[in-house]
Amino acid sequence: MTQRVHHTVVIGAGFAGLGMAAGLVRAGRSDFVVLEKADDLGGTWRENIYPGCECDVPSVLYSYSFSPNSRWSGVRAAQSEILRYLGRVADEHRIRERIEFGVEVANARWDESGARWHVRTTTGREYVARFLVVATGALHLPKVPTIPGAESFRGAQFHTAHWDHSVDLAGKSVAVVGTGASAIQVVPQIADRAGSLQLYQRTPPWVLPRRERLPVPRTALGAKVLRGLTYCGAETLAVGLNGHPALVRPLERRALRHLRRQVGDPALRATLTPDYRIGCKRILRSNTYFPAVAGPRTEVITERIAEIRPHAVVAADGTVRPVDVIVYATGFRVAGALAGMPLVGRGGVGLQQRWLRDGIRTHLGITVSGLPNAFLLTGPNTGLGHTSVVFMIESQVRYVLAAMDLVAGAGARAIDVRADAQAEFHEELHGKLATAVWSTGGCRSWYVDAQGSNHSLWPGFSWQYRMQTRRVDRGVHELF
């Protein structure tokens, strides 16, 4: 078996993995490798190439603070722009030469005697490293619903994350399943092209109008001020989402005004009106979604899909609608994105086994007791419903680098968070989540798993997370 030895192995070359690689370079640590299963970098921004794909947070916040981008073309950055930006960051920090593409990790096992991680790939190569950083992201496992008869469908069917650009939608009867973040972007792009559009809606989203003009700062200082003001404005939403629902009611009124202005039909407007608190599902922004939905070629169907036939979709009320193409805009399996990661830690106990036994538990969403020298980026409960996750990624990268420095400074071989500290963090975290809108807002969303637990979001301000991760508390760790 071919074996390579490094100080650090990073799994994944998306936003988190590239941020970690840049952090290592900036810290003067050159002995690392990034393993990427695809043939190019970019993660979710490489894979999601559906029409209209863009980031749904302000573009001014969607870049690393150490490498700001002044080239965004709009308030919300398009997929192609984000991918180019990530490529530029990789080139500026000479990261590409440290990425091994087409390398898929099969498993990783902690060697207790040697205090090293042994990372094995599907091709049989083995990488040995003191530190392991898992940066595979949360948005990489498409969630496709299991619908009776789907395998019999004779037309094209695909998930938005695997968009088939060879399929010409012109004049076709298209069914879009789902009304979340991807649907709100793709529907306006295809509604006029398709002959007819069937939109299958489980629950309507809250949709706010979006600002289209992007302020263009004239100086670097102006860009920094704009970023700071945008960040502070976004942070105010966290108050309403976390236990103070009265503070988001003005947003609900604004969204309802937006709906009234864009949809004249009272019956359709009622169908598109949410019956849960704003923020319970991801808040969406669009000036084109409602006009597309209200267009003459679009039909909104609220009955669940009971069956798919070779050339049709059958709703629960028995209505049979002929269809040529089915698009699943059904999001990702966020809760299970890391649970299946084959990481085997101390005592030969794997991550999945630990989480099945104890529930999904981490410390700060970064470390797991029993997995020494291993770090998760964008791990459980580090997502955000109000601002850019890039801020969280940078906080985590700083924490990982600080942990490495602590091990080196103590003359130790490894660091492992204590189980009692992890349990205390878990209880405090979920105590806060119990009063947050995702638990009390009256909806079902991908933020919450089938057991009713939220392992996706951080309950509070992002700056609070930055403060909690500003240093590694030696007292809650075992160094050995």
Image: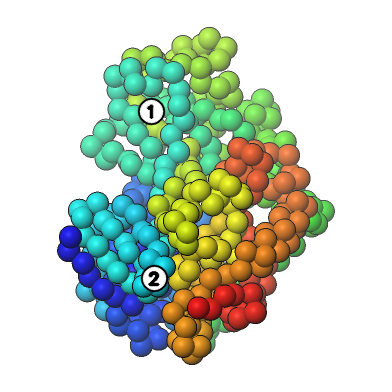
Few, some or many residues within 10 Å of mark 1 (<14, 14–19, 20+): many
| Tags 2 and 1 touching, CB below 8 Å | no
Check disc 2 and give the amino acid type.
Answer: Ser
Which of the two discs, 2 and 1, labels the residue nearer the N terminus?
2
Q: Residue at x 53, y 66 (%)?
A: 367
> What percent of the width, then of the height, locates residue 174?
39, 27
Q: Is residue 254 above or below residue 87?
A: above
Q: Does the rendering let one see residue 362?
A: yes
Q: Is 202 left or right of 435, judged from the image as shown?
A: left
- The outermost residue toward the top is 318
> What percent of the width, then of the height, locates residue 402?
51, 82
- Along the viewing direction, whichever of 83 and 423 lies nearer the viewer: 423
> What percent of the width, then of the height, locates residue 113?
39, 70
Q: Nearer the viewer, mark 2 or mark 1?
A: 2
Q: Is residue 321 above or below residue 30?
A: above
User: Callout 2: helix, strand or loop?
Assistant: loop
Which residue, given by chain and number where applicable, does mark 1 sit on? 326
Q: Quadrant of the N terminus?
A: bottom left
Which residue, given by chain and number where applicable, does mark 2 sit on? 113
CA–CA distance between discs 2 and 1? 53 Å
Q: Is 399 left or right of 254, judged from the image as shown?
A: left
Q: Residue at x 29, y 63 (%)?
A: 35
